[in-house]
Amino acid sequence: MEKREKEYRQVLPVPMYPQDYNIWSVLKNCIGKELSKITMPVVFNEPLSFLQRLTEYMEYAHLLRLASQQPNPISRMQYVIGFAVSALASNWERLGKPFNPLLGETFELEREEFRIICEQVSHHPPISAFHAEHEDDWTFHGSIHPKLKYWGKTVEIQPKGTVTVEFPKLNEAYTWSNVQCCVHNIIVGKLWMEQCGNMEIINHSTGHRAHLTFKTAGSNNKDLHRVEGYICDEDKQKLFFIYGKWTEFIKCTEYVNYEEYCKECSQKSKKEEPRSKSPNDSPCHASKKVLQKLNSLKVSPFKSISVQGSVDDVNLPEASDVPRSDSTYSMDIPNSITIWQVKPRPLHSGDNLRCL
Ligand SMILES: CC(C)CCC[C@@H](C)[C@H]1CC[C@H]2[C@@H]3CC=C4C[C@@H](O)CC[C@]4(C)[C@H]3CC[C@]12C
């Protein structure tokens, strides 16, 4: 078959503009509302529909082809894990609200490694369904119903719904549900997001399971974007340890290697002096003065706050800083293999959202 070499666009056709808006002034009237019922000023939107955003799950679809080519269920599970985590990578630093599709709206995309069709099957509540496949190697289908929850400074979006991967030639099906997405600093500060919660990937034919935990940033941002877990068999015997970051990579190693690594680490840390705790470890609480100021603050959706008047009289604790990932706490266990590694983003793709 002739190979298609196509050039796809690398940048959205129109840049987004810097615009100051008080996101809280919009959201405070929306507490308890569904995502689709929140009318936000259009500057908060990114020029894509939710169906297009879902299609981004497929960025690393080749991992499903690799999975389908593996002779044993554990290597297949490893690639399915890689796919499930990599599907979230494109969300990193994407803080615009996609457009809510109309009922019955569809979006199709065909690339070398997959073809997908998505359809909005319910408008209120918004539910999007999709079916993707590649020749007779695999199918991937499911539906997503994003549910919103407010927790003060944070909005949690739970993508309800189960997704399924099938390998028809092997008569095998895997299912899982996506973890929730937390968008922080909606009242004041710079918006940032993390994916957190547990994900259980089940191979319904063999009984193998993968338990993954998407961690919250934690104190000192030690666990920022970190994902950890294990693969076990139907007798709950832990076979492989999985670790990485949903924004960067996923590696795995035999569980015994991980146990060995932990032993060595605890021996080392006993020798070292215990680390002093920074005062920033305690949860911050905004003072009355700060709260009074909130309604006069203008928050640009994707950039840092700007205050009308002077910033000096509002001493905002941790308000403007987005935690940054560093490698201080990175673990590198000997004899690990990399299942998935993020591709560099196309030039400017972050800029569109960051440098407004
Ligand atoms: C401040 C609040 C109200 C606005 C947040 C807007 C943006 C950042 C939200 C709105 C809907 C969200 C999406 C809802 C569902 C999913 C599916 C999940 O598997 C990956 C994350 C993803 C794709 C979310 C990414 C973040 C998202 C696009």
Image (cartoon, grey):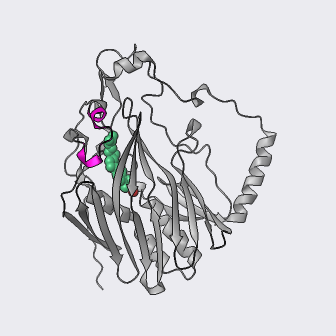
Q: How many marks?
A: 0
Pinpoint residue 336: horizontal percent, then vertical percent.
Answer: 63, 64
Q: Please give left or right for residue 207 compared with residue 155 in the image.
A: right
Q: Is residue 6 magenta?
A: no
In this orientation, which residue lies closer to the viewer: 68 or 37? 37
Which residue lies at the image location 30% right of the left edge and 32% below the top edge?
A: 28
First to last magenta residue range: 26-38
Pinpoint residue 62: horizontal percent, then vertical percent.
Answer: 42, 71
Residue 157 vertical position relative to residue 151 in the rendered view, above or below: below
Q: Please give left or right for residue 56 compared with residue 238 in the image.
A: left
Which residue lies at the image location 50% right of the left edge and 65% below the top edge?
A: 82
Pinpoint residue 176: horizontal percent, then vertical percent.
Answer: 46, 65
Q: Specify the quadrant of the image occupied by residue 75.
A: bottom right
Residue 81 vertical position relative to residue 191 in the rendered view, above or below: below
Q: Please give left or right for residue 75 compared with residue 127 in the image.
A: right
Q: Is residue 28 magenta?
A: yes
Seen as rendered, the residue at the extreme top is 313
Q: Which secondary structure class fits the magenta region best?
A: helix
Q: Specify the quadrant of the image occupied by residue 207.
A: bottom right
The answer, for residue 95, to whether it is visible in the render is no
The answer, for residue 271, to whether it is visible in the render is yes
Q: The C terminus appears in which quarter of the rendering?
A: top left
In this orientation, which residue lies closer to the viewer: 240 or 333? 240
Residue 216 vertical position relative to residue 101 in the rendered view, above or below: above
Which residue lies at the image location 48% right of the left edge and 54% below the top edge?
A: 246
In this orientation, which residue lies closer to the viewer: 185 or 270? 185
Which residue lies at the image location 51% right of the left edge and 48% below the top edge?
A: 225
Pinpoint residue 232: horizontal percent, then vertical percent.
Answer: 63, 68
Residue 289 vertical position relative to residue 226 in the rendered view, above or below: above
Q: The N terminus appears in which quarter of the rendering?
A: bottom left
